Image: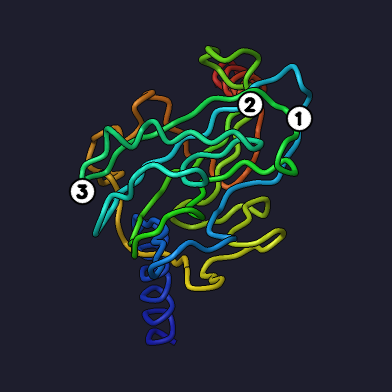
Amino acid sequence: MCKQWDALRHNVSIMRKSLATPRCIEYNKGRGTRPWQWSGWQKNFPNHLWMRVSCWIRFVNVIPPPSGNFGLKLHGQVDNSWLSRCRLCEWEHISSVAKVTGGDRNHILLIFDSIQEEVTIRFCQLKLEILESPNAETPLEEHFAFTNCDISRDYVAMGVGRRGIPTSNRNGSMDFVTDYPCEPDSGDDCSPSHKRTTIFGKSFRRKLWRQRQSSTSKKK
C-alpha cells in the first residue's frame, strides 16, 4: 500500500511540474506562400466596439519582410507595423487595435499566409480584448488562446473551424514547445501592461470578476 501511495504522489508531482512548464506555440513552414497559415478566433461583436489583439512573438531563424497577409489581422484589417521593432531570436510584445466590422468572416488572427521564406516563429500569450473605444485601458471582455495547461475551445488554428494543437496544413505546422519570454515564477512581470491574470483559456468580464473579488475580501 505504501508503495502505491508513493507512486501516486510521484505521478501527481510530475503532473504539477508539466502543468507549470512555460510553453509557447512554434510555427514552422517551408519556402513559398500557403493559405490557412494562421491561428486565432472567429468571433463577431456589436459594430460600435473595438478589438485589441496582442501576444509575444519570437522569430527564430529569419524575420520576414512585411507582406499583404502577414501580421495581426482583425476582421480583414492587417497590421504588421510592429515588425520594425523585432530582433532576431528575441521576444517582442506586439499588439494591434481595430474596429469591429465583421469583415473576413469575423476572423481575428495572427496570420503568416504571405510569408515567402522558410520560417520558424514562436508566439505565446495570444489574447483578444473587446473595448468600448480604441484607447480604452480596461476591456469589456478578454479571450485567451492558450496557457501552460489549457487551450481555449474558441481558439482555431490552420483552417476554418479547426481546433487543437498540434496541427498542420499544407507545408506549415504548429506545435507546443517549451519556451517563454520570461519565467512566470521568477518575480518578473512578463506583461507590459502589468495586468497579468491567472484566469486563462476562458472569456470573462473583468468588471464582474473584480466585483466578486471585492465582495470576497469584505467577507473575510
Q: Report, in whole angstroms, how far the alpha carbon at label 1 lies from the one at label 2.
A: 8 Å
The location of residue 21, given as percent across then percent down, is 34, 59
Q: What residue is pinned by disc 2?
A: 130
* Amino acid type assigned to the residue bearing label 3 in the image: Leu
Q: Report, in whole angstroms, how far the alpha carbon at label 2 lies from the one at label 3.
A: 31 Å
Residue at 38% from the left image edge and 23% from the top image edge: 193
Answer with mark 1 or mark 3, whichever residue precedes in sequence.
1
The location of residue 107, given as percent across then percent down, is 67, 44
At numbered mark 2, what does the secondary structure look like: helix, strand or loop? strand
The location of residue 55, given as percent across then percent down, is 43, 40
Mark 2 surroundings: few (<14), some (14-19) or many (≥20) residues within 10 A: many
Instruction: Assign the N terminus to one quadrant of the image.
Output: bottom left
Is the residue 58 above or below the residue 16 in the image? above
Q: What residue is pinned by disc 1?
A: 45
Answer with mark 2 or mark 3, whichever residue precedes in sequence.
3
Q: Nearer the viewer, residue 181 or 18?
A: 181
Answer with mark 1 or mark 2, whichever residue precedes in sequence.
1
Instruction: Assign the C terminus to one quadrant of the image.
Output: top right
The location of residue 126, given as percent across then percent down, is 48, 43
Q: Quadrant of residue 178?
A: bottom left
Is the residue under label 2 in contact with that under label 1 (CB below 8 Å)?
yes
Left or right of 173, for residue 99: right
At numbered mark 3, what does the secondary structure look like: helix, strand or loop? loop
The residue sitting at the right extreme is 46
Q: Report, in whole angstroms, how far the alpha carbon at label 1 lies from the one at label 3.
A: 36 Å
Q: What residue is pinned by disc 3?
A: 88
